[in-house]
Image (cartoon, rainbow, N blue to C red):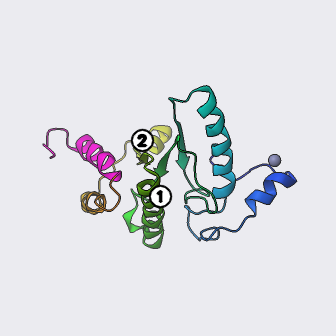
């Protein structure tokens, strides 16, 4: 969902109100609804495990459920794609650092659980906004930040592939080792 208008029934609200260390972060990416959202994902994953044991459930870690849940583990057939919301806004300062912290939390979780971890890198921006507004935009390009993000992939191993793909999209003729 692109908002936090989750179910208001007593049962759901009980889970939503569970404390989470990143619940009240003043940033776009936080953990407010992580326990609620990933409880739902786990229920789906348990069912998929029975009906399609060779398949995975891929889900987003995004916005109010950007951080891993606390108090329980994700099912083994869940793969997470972390939405690096500010990856195109390195000037976001504390918000950018917060996204890096959330990514690290997922990378640590993935190392322990051995689950796949993917990145959503917002290739849609700024082009989508320009297309909708029917104007041309300067393409998003932030070479220094990409270098930093690429270097950070040693600590978040799963980020490397996406970063290489990003670099190739920008400069398809450049060889990347
Ligand atoms: Zn409910």
> Mark 1 Cα within 10 Å, few/some/many (few <14, many 20+)?
some
**Picture quadrant where residue 27 is located:** bottom right
Mark carried by residue 135:
2
Provide the secondary structure element on which disc 2 rests.
loop
Residue 80, percent across and down?
49, 47
For this view, does 99 lie left or right of residue 49? left
The residue depicted at 52 percent of the width and 35 percent of the height is 56
Residue 68, percent across and down?
56, 58
For this view, does 164 lie left or right of residue 43? left
Magenta residue check for 162: yes
- CB at disc 1 and ligand 1 closer than 8 Å: no
Residue 163, percent across and down?
30, 50
Residue 122, percent across and down?
43, 47
For this view, does 77 lie left or right of residue 108? right
Residue that mark 1 sits on: 109
The residue depicted at 44 percent of the width and 57 percent of the height is 112
Q: Earlier in the sequence, mark 1 or mark 2?
A: 1
- The residue nearer to you, when weighing 95 against 20, is 20
Pair 1/2: label in front:
1
Instruction: Using the rendered image of the protein, determine whether residue 62 is visible from the camera's viewpoint.
Output: yes
- The residue nearer to you, when weighing 134 against 122, is 122
Numbered range of the magenta stretch: 158-177
Q: Residue furthest right?
A: 10
- CB at disc 2 and ligand 1 closer than 8 Å: no
Q: Look at the picture and state if 135 lies above or below 144.
A: above
Specify the principal SS of the magenta part.
helix
Mark carried by residue 43:
none
The residue depicted at 54 percent of the width and 46 percent of the height is 60
Provide the secondary structure element on which disc 1 rests.
helix
């Amino acid at each position: 969902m692109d908002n936090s208008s989750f179910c208001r029934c007593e049962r759901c609200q009980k889970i939503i109100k569970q404390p989470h260390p990143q619940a009240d972060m003043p940033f776009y990416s936080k953990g407010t609804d992580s326990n609620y959202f990933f409880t739902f994902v786990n229920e789906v994953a348990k069912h998929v495990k029975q009906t399609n044991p060779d398949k995975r459930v891929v889900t987003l870690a995004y916005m109010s459920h950007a951080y891993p849940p606390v108090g329980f583990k994700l099912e083994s057939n869940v793969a997470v794609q972390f939405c690096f919301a500010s990856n195109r806004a390195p000037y976001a300062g504390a918000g950018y650092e917060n996204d890096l912290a959330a990514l690290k939390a997922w990378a640590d979780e993935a190392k322990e659980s051995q689950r796949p971890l993917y990145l959503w890198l917002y290739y849609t921006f700024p082009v989508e906004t320009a297309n909708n507004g029917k104007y041309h935009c300067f393409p998003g390009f932030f070479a220094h930040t990409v270098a930093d993000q690429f270097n950070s992939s040693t600590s978040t191993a799963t980020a490397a592939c996406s970063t290489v793909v990003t670099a190739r999209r920008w400069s398809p003729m450049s060889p990347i080792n």
